[in-house]
Amino acid sequence: MSVHKGRCLCGNATFTIEGDFETFFLCHCGHCRKDTGSAHAANLFSSTASLAWTSGEDKVRSFTLAGTRHTKAFCTECGSALPNLQMDGKLLVVPAGSLDTPVTLKPAGHIFTASRADWDDGLETVPKFEALPS
């Protein structure tokens, strides 16, 4: 069984996850693009892992978009995306970027690509820089 640790950007909310992730998807739906401000969300999913807040649970809020199943948990101090339970607590959804421990599972695929941003095409050809270019 795996143990993962993670936190928000400001470090007020910290957590431990015990258990394994079953899948990892990069979601391009319009809701995920809006709540990440990016091309896609990168979420890990588990129906068996457990989430324990080690600090700052009082700083965590959840938002569910009316009329949808789209839920986002976040830190009220810094706004970072954080893990949340969905489907009546049966599914743990963990933003991959919130983890401090390595994730060995690779994404299983890009989902909702029909909603992909118009600028999200051919990004593998865009120049890569190890730091902010001068």
Image (cartoon, rainbow, N blue to C red):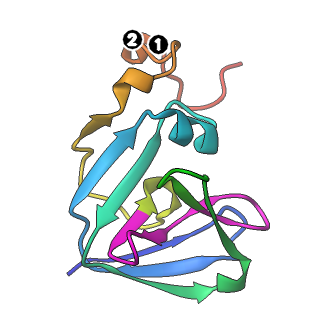
Residue 101, compared with residue 56, is above or below; it is: above
In this view, 48 is above or below 119: below
The residue furthest front is 67
- What are the residue bounds of the magenta stretch? 73-93
- State the quadrant of the C terminus: top right
Residue mark closest to the camera, 2 vs 1:
2
Residue 102 to residue 129: above or below: below
In terms of secondary structure, where does tag 1 sit? loop
Residue 98 spot, x, y in % from top left: 52, 61
Determine which of the numbered discs, if any, sits on residue 122 in the image: 2
Q: Is residue 75 above or below residue 3?
A: above
Mark 2 in CB contact with mark 1 (< 8 angstroms): yes
Q: Is 128 situated left or right of 110 in this image?
A: right
Q: Is residue 86 magenta?
A: yes
Q: Identify the image quadrant of residue 44.
A: bottom left
Neighbours of disc 2 within 10 Å: few (<14), some (14-19), many (20+): few
Frontmost residue, 97 versus 22:
22
Indicate the position of residue 7 as horizontal and vertical percent values. 58, 70
Looking at numbered disc 2 in the image, what kind of residue is underneath it? Gly
Question: Which residue is depicted at the point 63% across and 66% down?
Answer: 8
**73 relative to 103 in the view: left or right:** right
Residue 34 belongs to the span the image colors magenta: no
Q: Quadrant of residue 88?
A: bottom left
Callout 2: helix, strand or loop? loop
Residue 119, position as x, y percentages in the image? 53, 13
User: Which residue is rendered at x = 51% and y = 13% of the image?
Assistant: 118
Residue 126 tag number: 1
